[in-house]
Image (cartoon, rainbow, N blue to C red):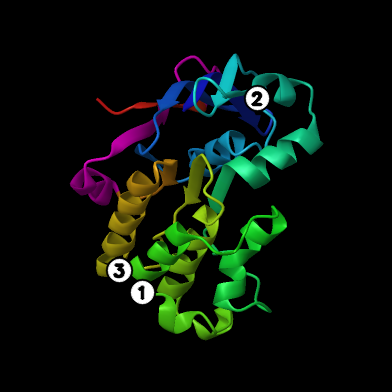
Amino acid sequence: MLHIENLTIRRGPDYRIALPLLSLQRGEVAAITGASGCGKSTLLEMIGLILRPETLDSYRLGDSATALDIADLLHEDRQKALADIRARRLGFVLQTGGLLPFLSVRQNIELPRRMLGLSVASEPVEDAIERLNLAPLLAKKPGQLSIGERQRVSFVRAIAHEPDLLLADEPTAALDPIQARKLFELIIELVRRWRIAALLVTHDWDLVRDCGIRNLVGVPDDKAPKGGTVFHDAA
């Protein structure tokens, strides 16, 4: 469903971040881990079509018969087409949550569907609201929520338009260990149920191991003469 080959970018004049190969199937969840400052969020932004890579051999998104070939769009810097893919095919969970403070929880969740002209009535969305215990919060504004509640709402909003790929940057970083584990496990469960592919940046190696998901680890790149990180599947 997602296939990327030879994706690299420079952060500053010297530091290189590289992803030699990544393939994800529908319903598959992978973590992105590594030392602080190694480029995990930068990698996520490259995969999320926010940053333009320095090199890229292949980037395909979607089922084989209808997969989008995104590499040419990135090479040609076709921003309008890339923005449309981000809106329709990708879902983002930011560290800060990114909820609009002047909208209610319900309105925040419905926003991606409204912007894409989709019906706001969605059985999977209602299922996610129930599973994450958000029903009592739907009329509230983000400022009235706890950090954990905001992160749960942000996750539902990110998948409300049923994207192909979910990208989450430290979705549990501000939570205590018990709440972090609960949210992490719920994200994995719902991603598998909805058959979305997902990449989750996290610093919590124990949580990744305990949940038994795939782990892309950032290690020093020996081929980068002035320093860098290369992301590989953990052995």
Magenta segment: 205-227
Quote the CA–CA distance across marks 3 and 1: 13 Å
Viewer can see residue 139:
yes
Residue 80 placement: quadrant: top right
**Residue 10 numbered mark, or none:** none
* Amino acid type of the residue tagged 1 in the rendering: Asn
- Residue that label 3 marks: 179
Instruction: Locate the C terminus and report the quarter of the image it occupies.
Output: top left
Disc nearer the start of the sequence (2/3): 2
Q: Position of residue 77 (x, y in %)?
A: 79, 28
Q: Determine contact: label 1, label 2, CB under 8 Å.
A: no
Q: Determine contact: label 2, label 3, CB under 8 Å.
A: no
Disc nearer the start of the sequence (3/1): 1
- 28 to the left or right of 40: left
Q: Looking at the image, is 149 positioned above or below residue 11?
A: below
- Residue that label 2 marks: 70
- Residue that label 1 marks: 133
* Amino acid type of the residue tagged 3 in the rendering: Gln
